[in-house]
Image: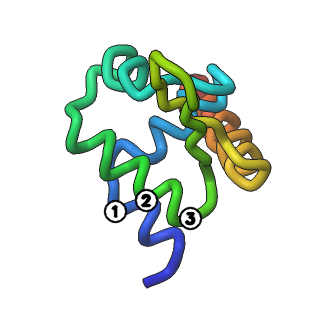
Amino acid sequence: MQPIDKLDESKAALRILLHLYNKEQTKLTSIMQDMSLGQKAVYTALSTLEQLALLKEETTKEFPFTRKFKLTPKGEKIAEHLAQIENILKTQT
């Protein structure tokens, strides 16, 4: 399976990439709430993005334990192009 196929497999992956591009880093609960996505869709998309080395997870070592997600440099490049595509799609021609 090609990487683009893997990215396309998860419906939420592209949207989460754009969300992280706009937020820089965010918590798991924020992704679900801000994007109105179910838990399974988010976990599947995050797993796919991690496998493709497009995001990394950071977990705090002290209480309260939080998981934050952030784009890798590779993920930032891809998300930047997705943002450009999104802007083109929003324009009327």
Q: CA distance from mark 2 to mark 3?
A: 6 Å
Q: Is residue 1 left or right of residue 73?
A: left
Q: Which residue is mark 2?
A: 48
Crowd band around label 1 with a 10 angstrom C-alpha radius: few (<14), some (14–19), many (20+): few
SS class, disc 3:
loop
Q: Which residue is mark 3?
A: 52
Crowd band around label 2 with a 10 angstrom C-alpha radius: few (<14), some (14–19), many (20+): many
Query: Residue at point 41% right, 28% down?
Result: 28
Whether pointer 2 and pointer 3 mark residues with C-beta atoms closer than 8 Å, the reply is yes
Q: Which residue is mark 1?
A: 9
Residue 62 quadrant: top right
Q: CA distance from mark 1 to mark 2?
A: 9 Å
Image spot of residue 8 (x, y percent): 41, 60
SS class, disc 1:
helix
Whether pointer 1 and pointer 2 mark residues with C-beta atoms closer than 8 Å, the reply is yes
Q: Is residue 18 left or right of residue 8?
A: right
Name the amino acid type tagged 2: Thr
Name the amino acid type tagged 3: Leu
